[in-house]
Amino acid sequence: MYESYAQFYDTSGQIRFSLLFFQYLHDLLERVPLPARLGGPRRALDLACGTGTLALLLADAGWEATGLDRAPAMLARARAKGEALGIAATWVEGDLQALPRWGQPFDLITCVYDSLNYLLHEAELRACLAGVAASLRHGGLFVGDLNSHHVLSTVWIGDEVLEQPGYVQVGQITFDAASECSRLLLVGMAGDDERGYQRFVEHHTQRAYATERLTSLLEEAGLRVEACFDAFTTEPPGPEAPRLVWVARRPR
């Protein structure tokens, strides 16, 4: 996943989520603030950072930012973007289920744009959250989101087509109630009649988790849930909320 698609990720419109979430994160941190810090910049870690947009925005805002992703092609895009913009960030290839041992803990850890949905078994999600708790400073915050069960099972189903000059993308999305998994078959084609076309196929699977279960897993990992919102609002999620955002703190 996210290898062939990496070069089309930002231009296909995916970058918009990170731009919007950066603004939303500012509102979240005003509502659920970090403790005061004496000396040095705050440290932020963006898990499943993709092409690095959120990490770079944090770095540009004065954070000491690190982005982690398991896809080398996405990290290559992140590095190139940072160099082009003149923004310094640290990029690490790694897995959500086995986070590195960091030299210093982080004030803030994010894992957004339904990256947690890609952890298909509770054991995988549990390992990720344990790593998050171990990587946070006491009093630090974790902000993570999930596509809701409602949106995966009833809304995000069917075919979708994206057409741009030089690029066409077709997605076929199904939901399996037995496994509670949404499956996306993504076919992309880039090029033109003169140069020819490059075609790629990727398979993406996301699992739906109940709100109460994720809250329980966060608490089992040693994180105190401070809030759960309907994404991009500060309202509690209703039964048809498409995306949920959790804010959880590592207790002092």
Image (cartoon, grey):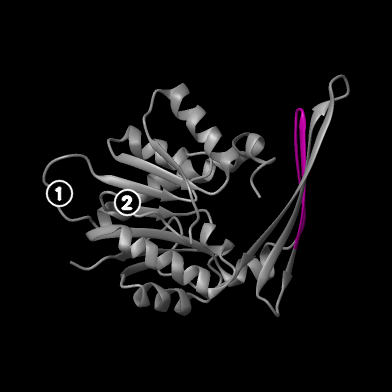
Residue 224 picture location, percent across and down: 29, 71
Residue 230 picture location, percent across and down: 45, 64
Magenta stretch, overall SS: strand
Measure the C-alpha gap from mark 1 to mark 2. Answer: 19 Å
Residue at the spot 38% in from the left edge and 72% down from the top edge: 218
| Vertical side of 100 occupied by 213: above or below | below
Q: Nearer the viewer, residue 88 or 31?
A: 88
Badge number at residue 160: none
Report whether residue 12 is seen: no
Q: Label 1: state its secondary structure.
A: loop
Q: Residue furthest top?
A: 194
Residue 152 picture location, percent across and down: 64, 67
| Vertical side of 243 occupied by 197: above or below | above
Residue extent of the magenta highlight: 158-173
Residue 126 is a magenta residue: no
Q: Alpha-carbon neighbours of circle 2 within 10 Å: few (<14), some, or many (≥20)?
A: few
Residue at the spot 35% in from the left edge and 40% down from the top edge: 58
Asked if residue 36 lies left or right of residue 214, the reply is left
Asked if residue 139 lies left or right of residue 57, the reply is left
Residue at the spot 57% in from the left edge and 41% down from the top edge: 72
Badge number at residue 37: 1
From the viewer's perspective, is the residue at label 1 or at label 2 nearer? 2
Give the amino acid type for the residue marked by disc 2 in the picture.
Trp
Badge number at residue 102: 2
Report whether residue 171 is seen: yes
**Rendered image quadrant of residue 147:** bottom right
The earlier-in-sequence mark between 1 and 2 is: 1
Residue 150 picture location, percent across and down: 60, 71
